[in-house]
Image (spheres, rainbow, N blue to C red):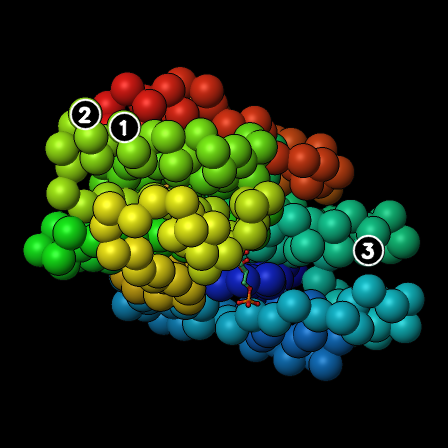
């Protein structure tokens, strides 16, 4: 293999730049030519590819977002889109790709490499949601949870000053990892996640218990955006009808969780994954996502990585019950 390319796709995630940098510099280190594809699969279809040199990735390890930009491509879902992408790669002689993204990205990669087996794709898990099988942490998850934690810490100050109960909605699509981790880190009174059925009676009982028995003067309930009871607005409305000890407010953190400087942990892990992805390509691996499980690098086939995410660790839910 002489020429490889790298792209980011799906929702951006802090740490993607560190990963791009690692792919480029590892590729150059081993004598490969490296191309950067802009806007994920969209750029592949539109032939937006630039040669990457060592200086192309200087001074980016600390930046959130992605210098290659990203997109959610509808055209790549069509055979015509994938055919155009294939032709753009072959005319340049690119044989290997490192795809940095989440489940949509790997789904696309899986279909594409089955149609065009002479192009090899290895993935790096890039999503704040942490919803991929085959890695303990996805790129972006640590930073997003730290960003959410800091925002919730700030809300706690004002909540307590006014005796208010806040329902804070965090991202995660249909996974509750961001919610669970930030709930533990901020000492939230309760957390609602899609992985477990939400029981509003039980939630109200719990808030009541905290108010009467623990004399709490304010409260935080973290609601994962994909929870079965609805978003934070809906849950807050339902609770308001039955529980009026505190004034109730809602906060939706939204895209603030996607931006910002990657944490130290993120930069190191993303760099490791990027380096390992190039080594995997050179070793002839294909159709796998690079992950780190128990501090060891593992390869997981795309179809397995995206199948369904890991279950919620019951110990983490227990921690919230016992420690709040
Ligand atoms: O997958 C990352 C994520 O931020 C999810 O948590 C969220 O549901 C979704 O992307 C939002 O996507 P968009 O930025 O396209 O609205």
- Rendered residue at 50%/71% (across/down): 68
Give the percent coordinates (x, y) of residue 250. 35, 60
Depicted 110 relative to depicted 212: above or below? below
Reading the image, the residue beneath label 1 is 209
Q: Nearer the viewer, mark 1 or mark 3?
A: 1
Reading the image, the residue beneath label 2 is 213
Q: Secondary structure at mark 1?
A: helix
Distance from disc 1 to disc 3, alpha carbons, whole Å, reads 54 Å
> Where is the C terminus found, in terms of image quarters?
top left
Distance from disc 1 to disc 2, alpha carbons, whole Å, reads 5 Å
Q: Nearer the viewer, mark 2 or mark 3?
A: 2
Q: Nearer the viewer, residue 295 or 194?
A: 194
The answer to the question of whether label 1 and label 2 lie on touching residues, with beta carbons closer than 8 A, is yes
- Mark nearer the N terminus (1 vs 3): 3
Q: Quadrant of residue 89?
A: bottom right
Depicted 224 relative to depicted 12: above or below? above
Depicted 38 relative to depicted 151: above or below? below
Reading the image, the residue beneath label 3 is 112
Q: Nearer the viewer, residue 90 or 212?
A: 212
Q: Quadrant of residue 181?
A: top left
- Mark nearer the N terminus (2 vs 3): 3
Distance from disc 2 to disc 3, alpha carbons, whole Å, reads 58 Å
Q: Secondary structure at mark 3?
A: helix
Q: Secondary structure at mark 2?
A: loop
- Rendered residue at 90%/54% (across/down): 115
Give the percent coordinates (x, y) of residue 264. 25, 47
Q: Is residue 1 left or right of residue 115?
A: left
Q: Which of the four quarters of the rendered structure image does ligand 1 lie in?
A: bottom right
Q: Is residue 201 visible?
A: yes
The answer to the question of whether label 1 and label 3 lie on touching residues, with beta carbons closer than 8 A, is no
């Amino acid at each position: 293999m002489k020429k490889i390319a790298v792209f980011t796709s799906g929702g951006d995630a802090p740490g993607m730049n560190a990963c791009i940098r690692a792919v480029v510099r590892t590729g150059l280190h081993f004598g490969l030519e490296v191309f950067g594809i802009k806007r994920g699969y969209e750029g592949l279809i539109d032939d937006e590819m630039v040669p990457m040199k060592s200086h192309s990735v200087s001074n980016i390890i600390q930046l959130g977002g992605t210098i290659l930009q990203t997109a959610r491509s509808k055209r790549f879902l069509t055979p015509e889109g994938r055919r155009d992408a294939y032709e753009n790669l072959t005319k340049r002689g690119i044989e290997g790709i490192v795809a940095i993204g989440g489940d949509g990205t790997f789904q696309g990669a899986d279909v594409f490499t089955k149609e065009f087996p002479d192009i090899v794709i290895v993935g790096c898990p890039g999503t704040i949601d942490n919803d991929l099988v085959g890695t303990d942490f996805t790129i972006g998850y640590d930073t997003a949870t730290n960003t959410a934690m800091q925002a919730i810490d700030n809300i706690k100050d004002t909540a307590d000053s006014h005796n208010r109960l806040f329902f804070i909605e965090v991202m995660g699509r249909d996974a509750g990892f961001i919610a669970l981790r930030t709930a533990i880190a901020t000492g939230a009174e309760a957390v609602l996640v899609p992985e477990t059925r939400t029981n509003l009676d039980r939630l109200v009982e719990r808030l009541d218990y905290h108010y009467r028995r623990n004399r709490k003067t304010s409260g935080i309930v973290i609601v994962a955006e994909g929870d079965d009871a609805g978003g934070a607005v809906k849950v807050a409305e339902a609770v308001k009808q039955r529980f009026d000890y505190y004034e109730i407010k809602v906060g939706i953190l939204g895209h603030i969780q996607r931006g910002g400087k990657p944490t130290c942990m993120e930069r190191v892990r993303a760099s490791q994954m990027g380096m390992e992805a190039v080594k995997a390509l050179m070793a002839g691996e294909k159709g796998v996502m690079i992950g780190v499980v128990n501090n060891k690098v593992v390869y997981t086939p795309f179809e397995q990585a995206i199948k369904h995410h890991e279950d919620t660790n019951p110990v983490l839910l227990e921690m919230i019950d016992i420690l709040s």
